Image (tube, rainbow, N blue to C red):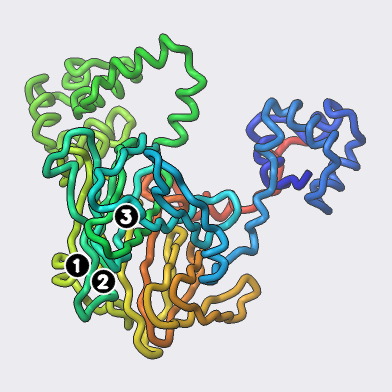
Amino acid sequence: MRVDNYKVMHWLNTRKVTTGQVAETVGIDHTQLEKLLADTDEWPDEIADALARALQITPEQLIASGRSELTVLVCTARELRDTRRAIQRDGIHFYNYYTMAAPQGAVAPVILDILCPADRVPALNNGHLEPAITINLGPGDIHGRWGEELTEATWQVIHANAESDEWIVGDSYVEPSYCPHSYSLASDVPARIVSYTGQSALAGLMEDVNDWSDPAAKTMLGWLDETLTPHKVATLLLARRGHTIESAATKLGVRETDLVAALDEGAAGLLRALGTTLGFDYRLLIRPASRHDAVGKTFKDIEECRAETRNFQGYQVTSMASAPHLPDLTGLFLRVAGDSGTGLSEPAESHYLVTAGSPTLHWTGADGREEHAELEVDASAWVAPFVSHRWSGDGALIKLGSGRHLGYLDLYELTNTYAAVSTLRRGRRDNRGWGYDS
């Protein structure tokens, strides 16, 4: 079993167990354990299993990811075609799916051949937890469906770009979790889409809730009751601290009605004072912005993208659909012309799909040397966070991102973390024990 020794040390520190104590519990000599921690990630299965039991975790929580030296992955057009799998739905050949470049075990964007004919209303799927961004790759238009009853919000044409600026390949939209959706052709012209189901910020909570008792889950859902207002969040945060709205107002030296009004109106000054005094982040009490339609999706057409075309670090770019309630899900149309593009470096993973030409990707490898790969149409690339890279040559790309690495919740936490840089510097590949003799 390949064990991540940094994870071992983390769990030893979390459980407040020294290496000597855990070696005795596992039934091995202390020097043997220290040698495993210092010299190898290949552990005998029986020792790894015994260690996991001693630490009250699963063996999977100790497994090494194998990505420590991973900077860029490339998938050629032929390799993409080799991932093809046909999907049957509603009695017909409905889609062909293809998978873009991504590390093993990571979420990857997919390309779909839309095969449901234009004279047929496409059967809906059941949706999925992960929110998604979807782009029409063309060449034809498609119909999108997002509900049983066909309305302006649930039945819409997603256009492809047939104009000279076809590097902006088509309309795009983002959809929320568990939004049923489906697609059909809008004419006899074939069409494809690229769909990226980014990581859901609720995934960790959902895993926990799956282990809760039914009464506990029912209580939580009853508390949420569809609308999580600032007043409701404040009541929860205050109750955890032994306060009511009334006692919190007294603590601040204001009237209860003034505090209620601040929650309703988003008065940042008073809410900041409340959070600072009682020890929570007042930003949780500010109502979030939204601009989605009746089924939760946010749409952006070609004309809007065309109007927002701009120069960015030597590339011509324009943004795809985005939504403030899904801040980690990003998409960009990118035009490469010559060798004027400068280096890019993203806080989270990036997925690229070549839609025109044959641009060359340059990047800094794990050894610090520059590497490059010339890509063709339908080739894709995955770039790890904070890996310096750039594009040259002539071509067009779709660039997609989500929050699997340094995302919205990470940034939220880092802005609250005391000595954030020192904390991350200490925590990266930390192999120090918790400071007690073995």
N-terminal of the pair, mark 2 or mark 3, is 3
Q: Distance between the residues labelled 1 and 2?
A: 7 Å
Residue 270, percent across and down? 15, 34
- Looking at the image, which residue is at 74% across and 45% down? 3
Q: Are marks 1 and 2 in contact (CB under 8 Å)?
A: yes
Residue type for callout 1: Cys
- Looking at the image, which residue is at 42% across and 58% down? 111
The crowd level at tag 2 (other Cα within 10 Å; few <14, some 14-19, many 20+) is many
Please indicate whether residue 382 sits to the left or right of residue 164 in the image. right
Residue 134 is labelled as 3
Question: Which one is nearer the viewer's eye here, 91 or 236?
Answer: 91
Question: Closer to the observer: label 1 or label 2?
Answer: 2
Q: In this view, does 343 lie above or below 205?
A: below
Residue 305 is labelled as 1
Q: In this view, does 337 lie above or below 131?
A: below
Residue 104, percent across and down? 60, 53
